Image: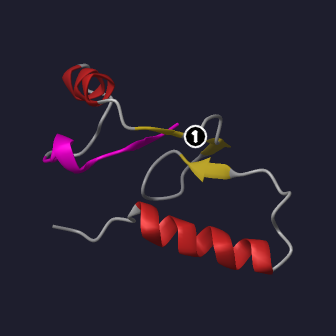
Amino acid sequence: MEQYITVKQLFDFCKKEIESWNADKHILITGDDEWNSYHWLFYAFNDDYDEIKECEEFWLIHDDWIDLENVILLW
């Protein structure tokens, strides 16, 4: 399995950006793993299992394999 970013790693990345005086900048996030498009990061975290399961059931999660118990959404 590929190495994906954890909440702890994201925190460390954010801390580094805050220390670099980027704390008040807005965040754009890539739309795919090849950086073909970007959109605003609109919301924060959601750890509701039912919401995550619904996203998986409606094909909103594009990975072939996912451990739904070990995922949190960043909207």
Residue closest to the eye, 61 or 74? 74
Where does the image place residue 65, in percent across and percent down from the top left?
13, 47
> Residue 14: x, y in percent?
64, 68
Query: Where does residue 34 sit, x and y in percent of width and height?
Result: 45, 59
| Range of residues picked out in magenta | 65-75
Q: Is residue 68 magenta?
A: yes
User: What's the amino acid at mark 1?
Assistant: Ala
**In the shown orientation, is residue 54 left or right of residue 24?**
left
Judged left or right of residue 73, residue 75 is right
Task: Give whichever of 15, 26 is nearer the camera.
Answer: 15
> Of 46 and 5, which appears nearest the observer?
46
Q: Which residue is mark 1?
A: 44
Please tell me in which quadrant of the rendered image residue 64 appears.
top left
Callout 1 secondary element? loop
Please state the horizontal and vertical placement of residue 72, each as a whole percent of the image.
Answer: 36, 44
Image position of 49 with respect to 34: above or below? above
Q: Is residue 39 magenta?
A: no
Instruction: State the residue at coordinates (30%, 25%).
Output: 55
- At x 83% / y 57%, what residue is drawn? 25
Query: Local crowd at mark 1 within 10 Å, few (<14), some, or many (≥20)?
Result: few
Determine whether 54 is above or below 64 in the image.
above
User: In the rendered image, which quarter contains the N terminus?
Assistant: bottom left
